[in-house]
Image: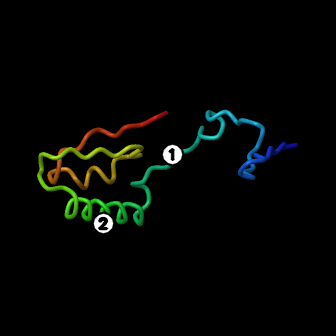
Amino acid sequence: PLSVQVCTNCKSLQLVHIVPSELIFKNYSYTTGASKPLVEHFHRLADEIAENHVESPDELVIEIGSNDGSLLSRLKGKSRCADSCRFF
């Protein structure tokens, strides 16, 4: 059985049990590049960023949590791109 706890301040619900990430993500191979609509979305977003926010190819662009780099790869040549920053 699962147990749920409630935050009395914000009424948020969450499971009490913590499932090990090794179990959840053992066969998880999701990448942005595996989804054509997501790649198209990130390419449009990158084009918008380059057009409206990057004034020089010398400007540094950083994407936090970039998954497989689909957004940054579109900005290469239009800006300096840092390697992705990942927090796991």
Left or right for 64, reference 81:
right
Residue at horizontal 58 percent and vertical 42 percent from the top: 27
SS assignment at label 1: loop
Residue 59 x %, y %:
16, 47
Label 1 environment density (alpha carbons within 10 Å; few <14, some 14–19, many ≥20)? few
Please determine whether, in this image, residue 69 is positioned above or below residue 50.
above
Q: Position of residue 86 (x, y in %)?
A: 42, 37
Look at label 2 and name its amino acid. Answer: Arg
Q: Where is residue 48 in the image (x, y as percent from the top left)?
A: 26, 65
**Callout 1 amino acid:** Ser
Image location of residue 68, percent across then percent down = 38, 46
Circle 2 crowding by C-alpha within 10 Å: few under 14, some 14–19, many from 20: some
Q: Is residue 6 left or right of residue 35?
A: right
Left or right of residue 36, residue 60 in this image = left
Residue 21 higher or lower than 6, as above or below: above
Residue ID for mark 2 = 44
Q: State which tag comes first along the sequence, 1 or 2.
A: 1
